[in-house]
Image (tube, grey):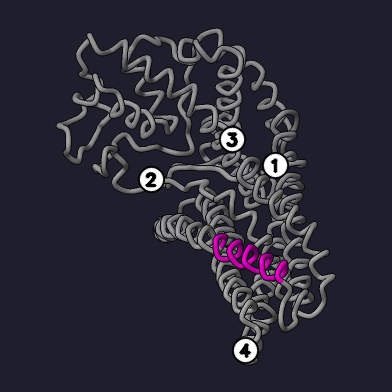
Amino acid sequence: MDSEGSSSDISTERTLEKTVREGESRLPMLVLASECVTFIKRGACYVPEKEWKLKNSLLATVGFLELGNAGDFAANVWNEIPAPSYAVGLMVIGGTLALSLSYFAFRDAKLSWSNLLLLRQERHDLRKQKLHSVENGQIVWGLDTRLDVSFREMGTELISRFGMDILMGFGAVIIGIGTFMAIGGANHHVWYASNLLSGYIGNVPLALYAIINATWSLYIWMKVRQHGIAGAKALHGNMAAALKHRVRTVQLYTSINGLTGIVAGAGSLITATMWWGYVILIPVIISSISCNYIWRHKIAYERPLLRRTLEVSKVSLLRELEFIVSVRQTLEEIPSESLRALITDSQSITSVIEFIVANDLFEDFCVRLLCDARLSELCGLPNEDLTINSQNLLTVDEAHIPRVLDIAQTCVNETGRMQFQYRERYLLEVLGCYLCVSQAGNFKTTLDVQLEG
């Protein structure tokens, strides 16, 4: 297997040269993207009728939730009757901040829930396929790999995102209400309720989340460590370095995220009675914002849901990763002529549409067509829901082909960069899982044998 990994890494350089020189466009083997998209009319725009893609939709504002946790600063520090006027002003600001951030927390929870529903349906389908494969005596390593990836995707969405949004959003609401109630602290009952809300009750959800999140972060850290060990045994060269880089990035994120939660939970409980607890929250706020950025820009990815099962192997994963590396390099070096370099006949609408569909760019491509005044009428009648099939676009009038090709080039340049980056992240995740599931490549599937032959 070591010789297999070495030959795969050597072929990476050859693939890069061959792709640019000959315009070879090998199709991806892991994910079969949709060739048909249905749009519905919403206002002046068309949007997909149903999402079939896991989205990197984490809101940047969620990273500031820990700042909302400190919104009761004035209420707890100046816990006296009557409160100074400047303290009242700070209470208004802190309470407003906490309540405002709770809105973004619940909004992000809704986006996360959409991802969870899609992942749950996909996981259900994968389990059914695995049961069928076992009954027929087929190898299920590929399905085990996908289920392993799916488990961590669902767990991260459920715990590190949805759970965080709900618990911290609820905590922010309680803290915000308690902070505003502190303004009317002259009433003993109001003062007492304010202390409970902005003190322990508002901060308990944060402490609860901290324990759950730290446990999950430790689990993810240990799993990606296994990926790194398996990759070190089975891979060499560029692919080994790429997997190692992702492993280290995820480990850095989980370490900071888990530790931040624990410190935040402890600090929030201390703030209920001690002013210096807010000093602890300063680095927590900074690290929380950093974790949000690292996740959105370094780790998370988007991918279509798996509607059909494709056999997975180490060789197929490495080949698709080589393809992605070559495409990303081309997009960096010659963005204005990328289609000409990536497709043998870049003036053929058939070849271009095939490339767009195979690389999960078809939905974005269709949106751009619908936004074009001259081409939108080719897709359907205005003010109607419509379905665009890739095969129908192949029959477009020759007079419109140059414009269609221009839109395709723009789509690849603007959306393709991030799309291929997302796919590389996902494939590295799958590769790490596959190497672990297959015990670092101590066996070969039938697909391995066919591809090596």
Comparing labels 4 and 2, the label whose residue is closer to the camera: 4
- Distance from the alpha carbon under mark 3 to that under mark 4: 60 Å
Residue 117: name its quadrant.
bottom left
Dot label at residue 424: 3
- Distance from the alpha carbon under mark 2 to that under mark 3: 20 Å
Label 2: few (<14), some (14–19) or many (≥20) C-alpha neighbours in 10 Å: few
Q: What is the three-letter code of the residue carrying label 4?
A: Asn
- Which residue appears at 66% of the width and 89% of the height? 192
- Distance from the alpha carbon under mark 4 to that under mark 2: 65 Å
> What residue sits right under mark 2 in the picture?
308
Q: What element carries label 2?
A: loop
- Distance from the alpha carbon under mark 1 to that under mark 3: 10 Å
Dot label at residue 246: 1
Label 4: few (<14), some (14–19) or many (≥20) C-alpha neighbours in 10 Å: few
Comparing labels 2 and 3, the label whose residue is closer to the camera: 3
In the displayed structure image, the side of residue 255 where residue 119 appears, left or right: left
